[in-house]
Amino acid sequence: MNTIIARADQALHHDLCDHCLGRLFAQVESGTTNKERGRNMRIAVALERGARGEEISPHESCWLCEDVFEQLPRFAEAAASKLSEIEHDTFLIGTRVDPALQDREEQLWSEVGGETAEPIKAELNREIGKLVEAQIHKEVDFTSPDVVALVDTRFGHVTLNIAPLFIYGRYRKYSREIPQTRWPCRVCRGKGCERCGGIGKMYENSVQEIIGDPLMRVAEGRDHFFHGMGREDIDARMLGTGRPFVLEIAEPRKRHLDLDEMTRLANENEEGLADFSQLRWSKREEVRQIKAATPDKEYRAEVSIQGKVNKERIDEVVKSLIQARITQQTPTRVAHRRADLARERTIRDLAIESLEEDRLVLRLRTESGTYVKEFVSGDGGRTVPSLAGSLGVPCQVTALDVIQIIDNANEG
């Protein structure tokens, strides 16, 4: 007897539907469905048994799947109905099946061999997907669908796993009183308390919320997340062409957003605190790229000089620090949330923009990760060399602006 027919004959000691019989041999031949393959196998086994004077038992109810494939139209209708509730261009079907059913499938594989078999979930996903595709006229996407409709075949329930939206842009921050991202209250962790005045946040607003809140409302999303190419201090402005970021909107029910209109909405929200430009669609991969980027940055720093130093000495020290390799121990102001490490960074360029008796304005370009305030002050000897240490008098940054992020869009 042919080996394949012999395996089918052994499998049919259980009452199997054509789907479950054919699925055992899914990798033997292509160009047909498991149902057709199972029907052909059943005929071949019947002929083989007939030659031996035996009969094949008529199919009544599938021992393995309990005839779940008869419910395909019902599942497809439920999935299509659920998918109609949201905007999407691509979709994928997933399924949950009774664990006992999967146990029986594995038992059958152990009895007759499962090396050419396809799991039942794979067939259910595909067959429901084909029916849904015909109903809703949307494309199936196996790699990055807008939404996955998860069908629970035990109850016929459908839940949606909606892919987030990713929107790239650049922001400028003009306020010295708002952080880049939403900052939950340290005391209540967002619940609202006396410390935060009931708002659940350390700061009432942030760059993230200025753009994220209006866009999330339009997209009917559940939440938003902000992924910036680094961050500036709360009291520092972000100027120039802005800092690159990707806004992530979780579980959006609407995806067809007009990004020009979204730019307008964001720029009208809390006007004067921040603005946004260059909005375009992005992907999760760009989030990883932005988080991993280490661009140089240009700053303007207003410095208070607390002592008498002549202009010639200041000029000499500033020139000596151009291309200086500095060592920075984790600053005392962030030591509570960052590991205490020594980091080496380079001051690429340093120039004096203006100088008065006790006030100096510096323009500097630094390697990514440089703590500019500590480079100026010395942070009690934790940054060496420093402007204050080289001048021999205390120095303090009184105002700091990031005037350019030197990423690929701003090289040169």
Image (cartoon, helix red, strand yellow):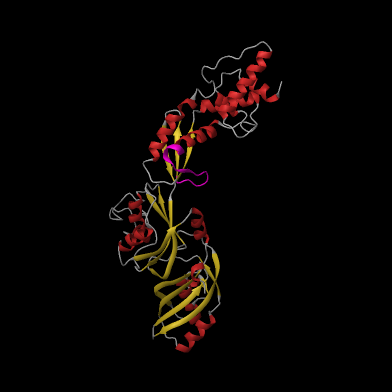
* Quarter residue 169 falls in: bottom left
User: As displayed, is residue 72 above or below residue 145?
Assistant: above
Residue at 49% x, 36% y: name it: 130
In the displayed orientation, state which residue is furthest to the right: 1
User: As displayed, is residue 321 above or below residue 75?
Assistant: below
Give the image location of residue 362, x and y in percent. Answer: 44, 79
User: As displayed, is residue 333 above or below residue 132?
Assistant: below
Q: Is residue 54 left or right of residue 227?
A: right
In the foreground, 290 or 157: 157
Numbered range of the magenta stretch: 133-146
Residue at 46% x, 75% y: name it: 376
Give the image location of residue 363, x and y in percent. Answer: 45, 78
Give the image location of residue 402, x and y in percent. Answer: 43, 71
* Quarter residue 263 falls in: bottom left
Q: Is residue 78 magenta?
A: no
User: As displayed, is residue 26 above or below residue 207?
Assistant: above
- Would residue 407 be visible to someone looking at this image? no
- Would residue 228 be visible to someone looking at this image? yes
- How many numbered markers are drawn? 0
In the foreground, 297 or 362: 297
In the foreground, 84 or 298: 84
